[in-house]
Amino acid sequence: MTLLRGRSLGNGKHGHVVDYRHVIHALRRKPMALLNLVYRDRLFPREAYRRTFERLVERLPERVACRTMVDLLALAHERAREAELAEILTSVLTAGGLPEMAALRRRFAPDPAALPVVTVELVPLAVYDVLLSGAAA
């Protein structure tokens, strides 16, 4: 795995590299932390996510905007569809709308036909009694 290295900026401040996948679980517990997060702009994996957050804050109450943005980042992380989701967000923003989480969850949900069928066969408990008594040896 290769990670970017944070380089110091010309003004004496340190460059920081922040990966949203490292903090998404903490943000899910406290989504309002996103609003005043020092590294927020570095947190977004692509420009579409940053613009989406700006649009959400413009049009929605802060609590709802933060919750929606954290849900979008979690969806990108859990489904490993960061680039595809960014394209959808760009098209939604271009149309002047806001992302709909229910529709996005349905779109990125696993295909039920692709999920394996798991059959669990339970062993009779008497088999364990035989093992414990040593009679199987």
Image (tube, rainbow, N blue to C red):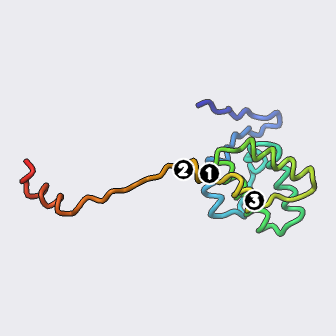
Residue 24: image location, x then y, percent: 64, 53
| Callout 2 touching callout 1 (CB < 8 Å) | yes
Q: Nearer the viewer, residue 88 or 47?
A: 88
User: Label 3 vs label 1: CA separation?
Assistant: 15 Å
63 up-or-down from 37: above or below = below
x, y percent for residue 94: 92, 50
Disc 3 marks a residue whose amino acid type is Ala
What's the distance in space between the residues labelled 2 and 1, CA to CA? 7 Å
How packed is label 2: few (under 14 Cα within 10 Å), some, or many (20 or more)? few
Which quadrant is the N terminus positioned in?
Answer: top right
Q: How many marks?
A: 3
Judging from the image, what secondary structure is the residue with disc 1 in? loop
- Where is residue 80, by image quadrant? top right
Mark 2 — residue? Answer: 115
Pointer 2 or 3: first along the chain: 3
Q: Earlier in the sequence, mark 3 or mark 1?
A: 3
Point out which mark residue 103 bears.
3
Residue 23's tag is none
Please tell me which residue is depicted at 9% across the width and 51% down the height of the picture: 136
Q: Residue at x 79, y 61 (%)?
A: 100
Tag 1 residue: 111
